[in-house]
Image (cartoon, rainbow, N blue to C red):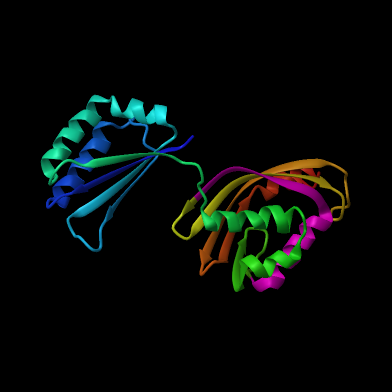
Amino acid sequence: MTFVQIVDYETKQPEALNALLDKYVAQSQGKRTVTHSMVGRDRESENHYVDVVEFPSYEEAMKNSSLPETDRMFKEMMALCDGMPTFTNLDVVRDEHLNTLMVNRMYDEIAMKGDMSVIEEIFAADYQDHDISNPVDKTGYAAIREDTEMWRSAFDFSFTKDAQMAQDDHVTTLWTWTGKHKGEFMGIAPTGKTCTMTGTTVFRCQDGMIKEGWWHYDAMGLMRQLGAM
């Protein structure tokens, strides 16, 4: 279970504290178990800061706390703070990134289930699509519908999301596609073969909608499996 520690403190030396954190990251490289760290400053009180530190589990957090580098960093941190920092320890029971949930509707509901009504719910009307198989970028709802129907008419397929990362307004998915060739595809008559293909898609979200997408995948490998090369 993901574990998060919230460190609440006040300091009049934020630059020195930031330099200390940089030194700690360098010194603990390859040892620390932190997966994500954020520092926030209170808009209502300029000396008030909150650090949010994420670990894969409570046990990994305890390993990190036992590092000599962590102990030294904390002692130096206290010297830069006005008073003793306070700690809140949290087991994460729900973790949702709304852009990721929206992007996954593309794979699960539109691509695999063929529910075209979802297109207008999650894509912007002026959506821009960049696909290595298309010589010219496509725009709008029609582009998504056209490409989806082309792939669905040629294959019975599924996506496995191997890895996914959300950062700012972008969601990147590393996926594996598996499809059985049932209809004409790029001039190739149905072969009945089951093919696999790996790829990466980056979606940019804006105002609660998917605004732009980049599709990169092993199209040459797919054509080889279909006997076209």
Please report the residue visible at 15 percent of the width from the left and 50 percent of the height from the top.
11
Res. 186 in view: no
Image coords of residue 55 (percent x, y): 40, 36
Total labels: the figure holds 0
- Front residue of 90/122: it is 90
Please report the residue visible at 71 percent of the width from the left and 72 percent of the height from the top.
142
Image coords of residue 144 (percent x, y): 69, 66
Above or below residue 220? Residue 25 is above
Toward the bottom, the furthest residue is 126
Please report the residue visible at 88 percent of the width from the left and 52 percent of the height from the top.
189
Above or below residue 29? Residue 11 is below
The answer to if 68 sits in the magenta stretch is no
Res. 188 in view: yes
In the figure, residue 27 lies in which quadrant?
top left
Image coords of residue 89 (percent x, y): 36, 38
- Front residue of 180/91: it is 91
- Front residue of 161/121: it is 121
111 horizontally vs 182: left or right: left
Please report the residue visible at 81 percent of the width from the left and 41 percent of the height from the top.
194
216 horizontally vs 227: left or right: left
Above or below residue 19? Residue 67 is above
Range of residues picked out in magenta: 139-165
31 horizontally vs 157: left or right: left
The answer to if 161 sits in the magenta stretch is yes
Image coords of residue 160 (percent x, y): 67, 43
Above or below residue 91? Residue 98 is below
